[in-house]
Each structure stands twice: as C-alpha cells, then as structure tokens.
Image: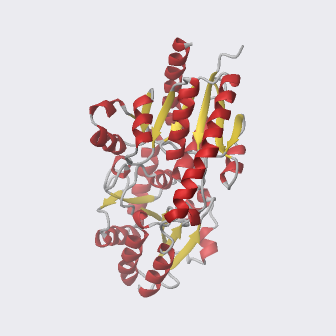
Amino acid sequence: MSDKIKVLFLDTNDGFGGVVRAHLMFLQYTDRARFDLYAAVLGHGPLLPRFRAIPDVTFWPIEVGTKSAQWCAGWRGKVANAWGVVPLLWTALRLAVLCKRAGLQVIHTSDKKRSLLLVLLLHRLTGLPYLYHIHNNYIEYAANRQALARASIIIANSAEMRRDFIEHLGPPLERIRVVYNGMDAERFRPGLPSTLRQELGAAPDDVLIGISSRLAPDKGQETFLRAAKLVAAQEPRARFVIIGDDSIFSDNADFVPLLKRLATENELAGRVHFLGFRSDMSNIYPGLDIVVNAAWREAFGLVVVEAMACGKVAIGTQSGGIPEIITHGKDGFLFGVRDEQRLAELLLDAVRQPELRQRIGLAARQTVLDRFTIQQQVHTQEQLYGVLAGLKNLKS
C-alpha cells in the first residue's frame, strides 16, 4: 500500500491569471515521491490543456456553473447564478465519491467563490480537512466566512493579505500563515534570448518599458500611459509595451478602448505597443529593460518577482504585497498608487542610467533566489499537507 499523501487541488478558474499560474507551477514542482496529486479543474475552456500538460497528476474535469460574460449582469446574471447551483451540487457529489474511492486525505482550495462552495460541500460529505489559500483581499459573503471557520489551515500569499483578513474578521484569523508565491528561477533568469526587440523593430539603444497584467482599471495601465507621456517628452529612446488582455472579467469592456484612445491623445503613437495576452513571458521579460506594476491593489505581485528573477528593474506601487517583495532603492523601486509623476521620475532615472539598471537587476535576482523560489513555497506547503494528513488519520 502506498504511503504517499493524497492531495486534491481545486481550481475553478475559467481564465488565465496570476492564481492559475501559481497553481500550475505548484502542481509541477510538488514531490511525486511523497505525494499523489489529484486536480479538479474545469472540463472546458483554455485552461484544461495547460493543467493536463503537467505530468503525474490525476485530473478530474468538473463543471461548477461558470457563465459567459453576457450572462454576468442584470436578470441574466441572477438566472445564471441560480442555474449554476445544479452543476455545482452534482460535481460535489461526484467528487465526494471519487475522493473516497481514491483515499484522498487533503484538499487544497483557493479563495475563488465557486471553489469555496465546492470545498464546503466536499468537507460536509467526506470530512476531509482542507487548506484555504488566500490570493486576494477579503470579500464578505456567508460561504467565505464558513470556509475560513472550517479550514484546518489557512495560508496567505502576503502579509498584507493576512492583515486584511484579520482586519475584517478579527483575532480568530491570526492563525493565517504567510507563504509567498514562488517562481521557477531557472525558467526566468538573466541572459535568456528574446525575440521581443526584433518583433517591435526596436533600435539597439531603445529602452523598453513594460507592464504585464490583465487589462483592467485597478491594474494601473492608465497611470502607466500617463507616466509614459511624461517620459516620452524627455527621452526619445523610451518605448512602452503593454502585455495582457481583458478576457478574465466582464466589468471592464470599455477599458481597452480607453487605453488606446489615451495613447493616441498623449501622442504616443509608435511608442506604445499593445501585445495582448502572451504565454511566452520567458521570452518577453528578457527583451524588456524595465518592468512596471502600477496596480491600485495587488495581493502579491508575481509579475514583479518574475521580472526581478530575470535581472530586470522592477518598479511597483506601494500596494498590497509589492512592498514585501521590493526594497526601495536596493532591488527595485516603489511609488504611490496613481502617482504618474513619481513613476515618470523613476523611469527617467532608470532609462538614463544603464549602470543603475545593472546594479538593481543583480540585487533583484538575488532577492528572488533568497526568498521567492518555487522550491521554497513547495517545501512549506508540503509540510502543511503532512499536518493535514495527520489530522485526517486521527479522525479515521
């Protein structure tokens, strides 16, 4: 009989974002000699092939009542939410049977609403202990409170997220542990080849400044473009790259046209490049000189860590978990939310001083190696799985 710990990983996301990237990386690096991994993921959409590409994981395709963008608002949204209960309940019953047959011991869930509803049902049906993984600010609804109360272990991807949950729910949430997201420091490293400059037709002395995230108001691309106008007026070598699309959420349909209109109004035609969603970030980062995160609120900031791992200058807001990653002036730079003037000043300094970019880039790489590798995250979470498996065995 195998003495491996059997872990079920729940992911009900239907769009590719930071949470999914973190999940994919964690599944890839968990020790197969100690753990049998199972993953319940949506049985449709663009994410399933990405999950299936990970070796030695048993996948259980599920349906949880996700809905298309046109069914997210008004009466359509209410109808879709009500109807979505049916596949959610059926999935919970099916997973409960599969869990018992496979001898599952631990469940790992993110803070996505459908994942929490599903884990509550599974916990009631199977009694399995679960780990609740915080990736974003607290949202008030009954299932969230219940999931937090019943979770055996709660972890957060930054101390700021831990503070946010404690602020809302008080001392009982002081049990939250901080486990920073990790990344593959071999996949993202200095000196990698890149086709980006060739793709953009950049001159050898052009300085490429990028921002990468979903295109939405709270991610700060508007601040980025306003700062770009100030920089472009003084530095003809600066060019600006916006990576990402607006496909994850339905509440920002007018935002991309706004950004493109702003680029035109700011006389940045030919200086700003909208690349859309890119799956080849290990090709994109090496082609950039500076990477900006201008988010109003950022639970962690995986893009910041990836850019730093590539030895790039990262400039981020004093928001969420970003100040826990960047030490201002040592391995990157920080600026206030929506402060395009300060961002422009930092960008001009970095554009004009290649030696500064080199010094900061070296320190940034070392910070990642010291604190943010996927091996560090996996080691900590594997230990927590062992604790949860022990709880399950005590109840058995």
* Location of residue 225 with respect to 43 vertically, above or below: below
Q: Nearer the viewer, residue 84 or 251?
A: 84
Tell me the quarter of the picture where residue 227 sits. bottom left
Q: Nearer the viewer, residue 129 or 212?
A: 129
* Location of residue 77 with respect to 57 vertically, above or below: below
* Location of residue 210 with respect to 206 vertically, above or below: above
Residue 351 rendering spot, x and y as whole percentages: 40, 71
Residue at (58% x, 69% y) in the render:
276
Residue at (50% x, 24% y) in the render:
383
Residue 394 rendering spot, x and y as whole percentages: 52, 12
Q: Nearer the viewer, residue 290 or 63?
A: 63
| Number of numbered discs | 0
In the rendered structure, the answer to whether residue 350 lies left or right of residue 305 reads left
Task: Inspect this view and state whether residue 28 appears.
Answer: no
Quadrant showing the N terminus: top right
Quadrant showing the C terminus: top right
Residue 378 rendering spot, x and y as whole percentages: 53, 33
Residue 285 rendering spot, x and y as whole percentages: 54, 60
Q: Nearer the viewer, residue 340 or 104?
A: 104
Give the colour scheme shown: secondary structure
Tell me the quarter of the picture where residue 91 sits. top right
In the rendered structure, the answer to whether residue 333 lies left or right of residue 88 reads left
Residue at (64% x, 67% y) in the render:
195
Task: Inspect this view and state whether residue 350 appears.
Answer: yes
